[in-house]
């Protein structure tokens, strides 16, 4: 009987790559160059090529990508950024770090992505200086439509692609639609390093240049800091070399994730559970998330029968203890309800069909 240790077993992910990863790491050791060297430069070229964007600037993590991306767009104190509140504080933390204020559009109950009608209403109602679109769980939002609405009002769009590496819509990849696409390479992401990492991609040379300066103290040249808001946020050579080993596997991994998710959706049949739809290449199944009004009962049942599960995410950003006073009175109905009902099942590329069927069986026997 197979056993699942958690919703995502990274030891199985890296095991088949050990020889190649070892070679890559040794190459960096031998080079004696550990920060902003040839591995980083080559990875940036390879990743921008993969995303179909002309520029990539690698960074220390995905939250920095969001924050420095916003700063490059002149977001700071006195500015307002529109996003969603069901995405684990990432966007909110980045917005607050710039000194700007987050406001939230509600989500749609079926996709758990931004409700475009609510987004449009908010764009019309108040001053908004940027929009962050979150491709939650690996499902692309209708970003062409959001870009159309925002750009008509001269508002820039930042895509949060930290869960959506490689997701595609009409032949274009996540990150290539908005002004800036932000990625995390945290180990559990669809493309994950062996530590922290992040990047922005963009088609705009001016924005790429600004983020490049911001990641290194605001320098325009060595020791000359011309840009406000700079600091240290760099991907290191070791992680870049590791990511170069993994990038060629990404599409295959995403395909396998999507296969497992489709298997779940086809076979999960329980009157108290709502499973997500079956999606094509616009979904890279970063997380497989079901909904139920009796989440605690299901979670406990699964724990008893040896199936790990998790909650992404239990608390809307506006209701977080650290933010509650800032967002007094903010409540988005579909967002609050989703946070009370979502449950994540194991889904990672190395899972076997047998393991997926075991999860399905245990879910259906609840
Ligand atoms: C993981 C994640 C981030 C943050 O990335 P870090 O590298 O952990 O800073 C941002 N947005 C989303 C949607 C994420 O899932």
Image (cartoon, rainbow, N blue to C red):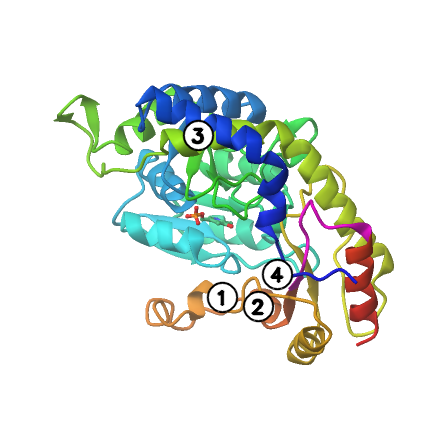
Asked if the magenta segment contains residue 175, the reply would be no
Query: Do we see residue 55 in this rendering?
Result: no
Quick one: SS at disc 2?
A: helix
Residue farthest left in this picture: 223
Q: Around disc 4, counting alpha carbons within 10 Å, would you say few (fewer than 14), some (14 to 19), or many (20 or more)?
A: some
Answer left or right for 268 relative to 324. right
Circles 3 and 1: CB atoms closer than 8 Å: no
Which labelled disc corresponds to residue 6? 4
- Magenta stretch, main secondary structure, is loop
**Residue 199's x, y, as percent?**
43, 34
**Mark 1 sits on what residue?**
316
Question: Looking at the figure, which quarter contains the N terminus?
Answer: bottom right
Circles 3 and 4: CB atoms closer than 8 Å: no
Of tags 3 and 4, the one toward the viewer is 3
Of tags 2 and 4, the one toward the viewer is 4
Residue 265 picture quarter = bottom right
Tell me the CA gap for discs 1 and 2: 6 Å
What residue span does the magenta drawing correspond to? Answer: 344-353
**Mark 2 sits on what residue?**
339
**Residue 279's x, y, as percent?**
76, 45
Precedes in sequence: disc 1 or disc 4: 4
At 23% from the left and 36% from the top, the residue drawn is 230
Circles 1 and 2: CB atoms closer than 8 Å: yes
Question: Looking at the figure, which quarter contains the C terminus?
Answer: bottom right
Residue 307 picture quarter = bottom right
Which labelled disc corresponds to residue 25? 3
Precedes in sequence: disc 3 or disc 2: 3
Q: Is residue 188 above or below residue 150?
A: below
Tell me the CA gap for discs 3 and 2: 40 Å
Tell me the CA gap for discs 1 and 4: 24 Å
């Amino acid at each position: 009987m197979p056993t699942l240790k958690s919703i995502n077993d990274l030891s199985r992910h890296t095991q088949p790559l050990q020889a190649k990863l070892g070679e890559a790491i040794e190459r960096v050791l031998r080079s004696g160059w550990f920060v902003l060297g040839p591995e980083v430069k080559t990875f940036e070229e390879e990743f921008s090529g993969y995303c179909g964007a002309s520029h990539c600037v690698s960074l220390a993590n995905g939250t920095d990508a969001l924050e420095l991306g916003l700063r490059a767009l002149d977001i700071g104190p006195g500015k307002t950024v529109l996003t969603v509140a069901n995405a684990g504080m990432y966007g909110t933390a980045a917005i607050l770090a710039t000194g700007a204020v987050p406001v939230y559009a509600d989500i749609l109950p079926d996709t758990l992505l931004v409700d475009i009608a609510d987004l449009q209403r908010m764009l019309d109602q108040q001053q908004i200086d940027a929009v962050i679109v979150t491709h939650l769980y690996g499902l692309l939002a209708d970003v062409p439509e959001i870009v159309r609405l925002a750009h008509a009002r001269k508002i820039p769009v930042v895509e949060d692609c930290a869960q959506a590496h490689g997701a595609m819509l009409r032949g274009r990849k996540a990150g290539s639609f908005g002004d800036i696409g932000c990625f995390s390479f945290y180990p559990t992401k669809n493309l994950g390093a062996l530590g922290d990492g992040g990047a922005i991609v963009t088609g705009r040379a001016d924005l790429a240049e600004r983020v490049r300066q911001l990641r290194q103290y605001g320098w325009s040249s060595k020791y000359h800091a011309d840009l406000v808001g700079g600091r240290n946020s760099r991907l290191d050579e070791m992680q870049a070399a590791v990511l170069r080993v993994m990038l060629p596997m990404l599409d295959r991994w995403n395909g396998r994730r999507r296969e497992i998710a489709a298997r779940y959706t086809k076979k999960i049949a329980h009157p108290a559970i709502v499973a997500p739809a079956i999606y094509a290449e616009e979904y890279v199944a970063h997380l497989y998330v079901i909904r139920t009004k009796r989440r605690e009962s299901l979670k406990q049942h699964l724990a008893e029968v040896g199936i790990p599960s998790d909650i992404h995410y239990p608390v809307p950003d506006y209701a977080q203890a650290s933010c509650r006073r800032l967002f007094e009175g903010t409540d988005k109905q579909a967002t609050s309800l989703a946070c009370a009902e979502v449950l994540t099942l194991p889904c990672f590329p190395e899972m076997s069909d047998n393991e997926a069927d075991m999860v399905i069986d245990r879910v259906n026997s609840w």
